[in-house]
Amino acid sequence: MISRQKALLHPAAKPVLFLICMLPFAWLVFRALTNQLGANPAEALIRATGDWTLRFLCIVLAVTPLRVISHTPALARFRRMLGLFVYFYVGLHLLSYSWFDMGFDVPDIVKDIIKRPFILVGFAAFVLLTPLAATSFNAAIKTLGAKRWQMLHKLVYGIAGLGLLHFFWMRAGKNNFAEVFVYAAIVAVLLGWRVQQFLKKKKLQSLQNLRQSLSNS
Ligand code: HEM
């Protein structure tokens, strides 16, 4: 039986994942072309692309915990592509809003973003995602240095928080929070795992320091 690690390292693994990540987009295009987006196609497109942005954010945040818990280092090679798909779907989300809701009227878009706090929060998340997408290439990692690059990419938790707030605020008008709570629980578990790993590392470090100072004395 082909091992999990071997399958993930296969040259076809990345193209296959790419095609899987494109499926929601292909499904939306198909539904749009065959008039299957319901009574309000613009709203359906904005909402579906918003949902997929949040789903891909959760998937990206899950890669490291899954890699560590399942002892599958090869999972790390998919993180960058998954991160770029967050940007792809938020780009489509912004495009759908700017096109179908606002008719590409830039002054109107600026006014709307400032006027409606939930859109302002979504836009802030988009702005913060931009440097992450722009620095997801090897050359940028080299230029920034691994430490600074890692620090910058920790922004993804703040972005997930803003995305959740944006979703919460939007649903507050409709008093419909069930889905928001599901996503919030997923992000909380993933963030909680990170915090636990950080505390474990700190504890191990201080134990090592103590051992070293005892052996020096
Ligand atoms: C990381 C960034 C973002 C995330 C995660 C996100 C996510 C979401 C989600 C999950 C929804 C609700 C979908 C549903 O009801 O099923 C939504 C709706 C919406 N978002 Fe975003 N969004 C982001 C950025 C933006 C940006 C940049 C804009 C525009 C400037 C924007 C404008 C909207 C609008 C207009 C709606 C629909 C409101 C409605 O139908 O009444 N979002 N977004």
Image (tube, rainbow, N blue to C red):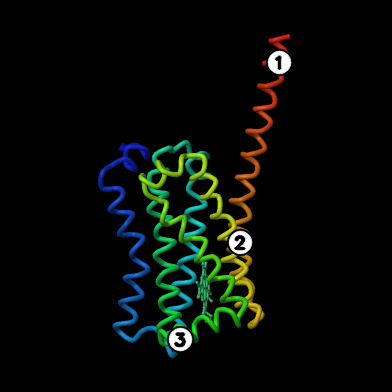
Q: Earlier in the sequence, mark 2 or mark 3?
A: 3
**Does the Cβ of the disc 3 residue fall within 8 Å of ligand 1?**
no
**Classed neighbour count for the residue bearing mark 1: other residues with Cα under 10 Å, few (<14), some (14–19), many (≥20):** few
* Count of marks, rendered view: 3
Q: In which quarter of the image is residue 75?
A: top left
Question: How far across and down, in percent of the image, does residue 130 sit?
Answer: 46, 61
Task: Using the image, determine if residue 94 lies above or below residue 202.
Answer: below
Q: Using the numbered discs, state the Cα–Cα distance from disc 3 to disc 1 in whole angstroms.
A: 65 Å
Q: Give the residue at x 55% y 84%.
A: 111
Instruction: Quarter of the image for the N terminus: give it.
Output: top left
Question: How far across and down, in percent of the image, does residue 206 sit?
Answer: 69, 26
Using residue 26 as the reference point, say whether residue 176 is left or right of it: right
Q: Is mark 1 on a helix, strand or loop?
A: helix
- Kind of residue at badge 3: Met
Q: What element carries label 2?
A: helix
Q: Using the numbered discs, state the Cα–Cα distance from disc 2 to disc 1 in whole angstroms.
A: 41 Å
Of residues 92 and 140, which is closer to you in this image?
Answer: 140
**Classed neighbour count for the residue bearing mark 2: other residues with Cα under 10 Å, few (<14), some (14–19), many (≥20):** some
Mark number, residue 187: none
Q: Give the residue at x 54% y 65%.
A: 125
Task: Using the image, determine if residue 59 lies above or below residue 36.
Answer: above
The residue at which mark 2 appears reads as: 161
The residue at which mark 3 appears reads as: 102
Of residues 149 and 57, which is closer to you in this image?
Answer: 149
The residue at which mark 1 appears reads as: 213
